[in-house]
Amino acid sequence: MGDNIWRPCPVLLLAGLLPALLPGTASFTPSLDSDFTFTLPAGQKECFYQPMPLKASLEIEYQVLDGAGLDIDFHLASPEGRTLVFEQRKSDGVHTVETEDGDYMFCFDNTFSTISEKVIFFELILDNMGEQEQEQEDWKKYITGTDMLDMKLEDILESINSIKARLSKSGHIQTLLRAFEARDRNIQESNFDRVNFWSMVNLVVMVVVSAIQVYMLKSLFEDKRKSRT
């Protein structure tokens, strides 16, 4: 199953022994938002695992970029194995969950298709991963006498977090635009091939019909009477 899947090393990491025990699985580093595009062959299912802390936010957005029907089955399960989301024959979807401590599993299922592989894009957006509080503590170690500053430490942190959130939102929007562009391009190329195919069929039919008409008109003017001697 791994031959048709591209896994960018800076984003995707193996999580301990979990991929070795469960073939066809992958894990993501909990501190980074990530996006991933892969090919899912016909009749197969691919699952991924994302470790999450308590009271964090996990957002999953996916799109089917290419493949007959542009549809896929999607399943999201909690660390206890409880089904949170189950969708059938969807071309895209966005889901956000407040997390518990543990590994969340989400799967893309193409077993309903017997001949068509699917190209799938998905993005993970992780919030409240516990890093912001640690960063604030690190800041406080190096800042003393805040009453002497024109701007308080809280104001600086608020500005930095606002800039960080806007940059993350901008990157998220650009990623989605690239995914939409890829899907639209695939649709246009498929329509182009269909138009060319049926244009050739119509051309062949017109040539055959014209030849038949010329033959029939020519046969009408032929003198078939036998001459007497």
Image: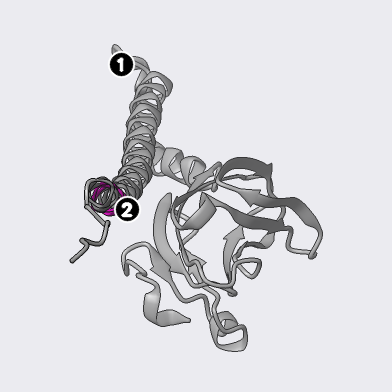
Name the residue rendered at 63%, 40% in the picture. 96
* Label 2: element kind: helix
At horizontal 33% and vertical 26% (from top left) the residue drawn is: 163
Inspect the image, locate mark 1, and give the three-letter code of the amino acid beneath it: Met
- Give the magenta range: 204-213
Q: Could you say which is closer to the camera, residue 55 or residue 169?
A: 169
Asked where in the image residue 208 lies, by quadrant, the reply is bottom left
Q: Is residue 33 left or right of residue 42?
A: left
**Relative depth, front residue between 21 and 160:** 21
Label 1 and label 2: CA atoms lie apart by 82 Å
Mark 1 crowdedness (10 Å alpha carbons): few <14, some 14-19, many ≥20: few
| Residue bearing mark 2 | 201
Residue 208 is covered by the magenta coloring: yes
Q: What's the residue at 26%, 57% (across, down)?
A: 224
Magenta stretch encompasses residue 128: no
33, above or below 2, in the image: above
Which of the marked residues, 1 or 2, is nearer the chain's N terminus? 1
